[in-house]
Amino acid sequence: MTGSEGVAVRLEACAKTFPDGTHALEPMTLDIARGETMVFLGPSGCGKTTTLRIIAGLERPDPDGRVLFNGEDVTHIPIERRNVGMVFQSYALFPNMSVAENICYGLKIRGVSRADRASRLAELVALTGIAGLEHRAIDQLSGGQRQRVALARAVAIRPRVLLLDEPLTALDASLRERLRGDLNQLLRSLGITAVYVTHDQAEAMALGDRIVVMRHGAIAQIGAPRDIYFTPADRFVAEFIGAANIIEAAAKDGFIALPGGRIGLTDAKTAATVVVMIRPETIKIVAPGDARLRGKVETVSFVGDRVRLTVTEAAERPLAIDAANSTQVRVGDRVGLSIDQAAVRLLEPRR
Amino acid sequence: MFAAQLAFTLLVAAFLIVPALLSMLAGVTANYFRGISSGLTLDWVLQVWELYADTIFRSFEIAFATLACTLAIGVPAAYGLYVRGDRLARLIEEIITLPLAIPGLAIALALLLTYGGFGDFRRSWSFILVGHVVFTLPFMVRSVMAVLGQIDVRTLDESAASLGASPWRRFRDVIVPNAAPGILAGSLMVVTLSLGEFNLTWMLHTPLTKTLPVGLADSYASMRLEVASAYTLVFFVMIIPLLVAMQLIGRRNGRPGTARA
């Protein structure tokens, strides 16, 4: 409907060293496919925003780095001629302009006629669900409405790539979840290439076609949300994405020996120490009698859609378990734990 | 407690205001030494007007020319310095601010040493204008920069840039309208400082380029006390409406939420 033409984005050996000598980004090479939503995820200071700003043209990569849009080198093209749409965490709406003037500003700069601007405006307010607010001042809008105006303004110019820098972080939790859904739908329907920066792993998984997990200015892992979740490359990724039980123990003939029994591995490995990750929802509570691994229930919290338990005496540290909300266990119960071999993920030992 | 506070406030106000009122009253008294009983007259005011009208007009000319210069230099400078924000920018900001700490006489002396040889320039009021611009520029730059800091202008600038606006369009469409309260506050400061500036101007003036405060000093030194007082009265009458007008403009434009749809 809006005919946005996304481009394939390629970062080639893009590093960033700030004038004070800080290495914000190690050399990074990365391809973002046309129409793909790529999420950069990581703790603050991991270099994700710097990467976004390099794609935008707000930061220059160090001399060897290049930024390519559909193969065209845009490294030295300033942001105002790159034709990128940006949504900022603070939205950065112009307080001196109305909603309509904000949305149409980029079109006005491009010399689009008044009539065409009006029709594009009508299209955009309908798309983002803010019809009727066109003549409001910015300070008369709620946080969610501002977010939508910022999005409409960025999309209005039919950008080659849409860049979103923590666009939902400033909103409260319930609104964030609703807007996340709307945003997801919008990105799919526009079919635009989008780069999304966040520190929220739930947001990253909900929105990303692929996720780049970053740490200390480098890529820790790239993959589809499922891959990142179930087969994290290392302990950092495992712990950053969702809850994870990390167990460090000796392995013998494909089994890990623990205080409460043993856990089977997919390969018959023997090693002095292995590190494995087990997601809480992959551990099942069974009768203690016939289980390979046993423990004692330490805490039970019913959170509605599931029951979260911690079980001691099975491993060195308490295990977190997400069980079905119909599970009937009490603190102090002795339980058996059943873990599918496929759910036990071997990680690289800490380097 | 409240009564004590009120009394103290009134006392301080009286301490500051009474001398000004007495001075203005002296300006319309027929004979100051005989007091108000000698009768009220506008003769002194008329005499001031005849003798010093040119200094009054010159002062306003210089004040508005100074304003024009500080707007043309100070607002873009504040934008540039704020957006740049690095060590060099801070250094330049310090240098611009330096005239605040240096006595006006020293600035005047430096200007005389440097440009005193350029006869025509030295003799025109633009020589005084240069001094006033040097002296008032930091007030404009500072008050604009303060507002730029409040509105997170760097992100506004970046978002306008992402929409395709050139630096000039960004400055015109986004920066200036949103910095308006700071620009107005700075303008108010610049005009009042320029109108009242004495030290620097006294050093730089020639008999043909006297400004209002210099004329006032002149009349105190060489005229009847009533004339000098009438001069003060004229000064107040001219400057107060100006200040009120600028405040009103500032309040109307500075109020948040007045978007033009």
Image (cartoon, coloured by chain):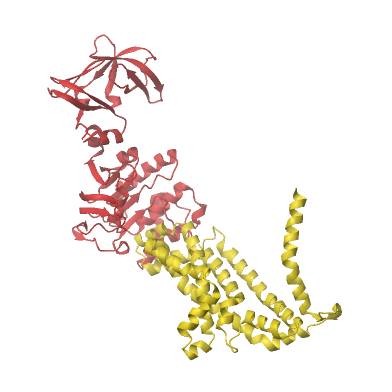
| Colour of chain B in the image | yellow
Q: Residue at x 45, y 49 (%)?
A: A145
- Displayed quadrant of residue B162: bottom left
Residue B225 vertical position relative to residue A16 in the rendered view, above or below: below
- Judge by depth and name the residue closer to the eye, B250 or A302: B250
Up-down: is B84 above or below B53? above
Q: Compare residues B39 and B207 and report the one nearer the observer.
A: B207
The shade of chain A is red
Seen in the picture, residue B199 relative to A45 is either above or below; the reply is below
Please tell me which residue is depicted at 12% across the width and 22% down the height of the picture: A268
Vertical position of residue A134 compared to residue A301: above or below: below
Rendering quarter of residue A81: bottom left
Residue at 47% x, 66% y is B176
Q: Tell me where residue A329 appears, x and y as whole percent.
A: 37, 15
Which residue is most to the right? Answer: B37
Residue B72 located left or right of residue A8:
right
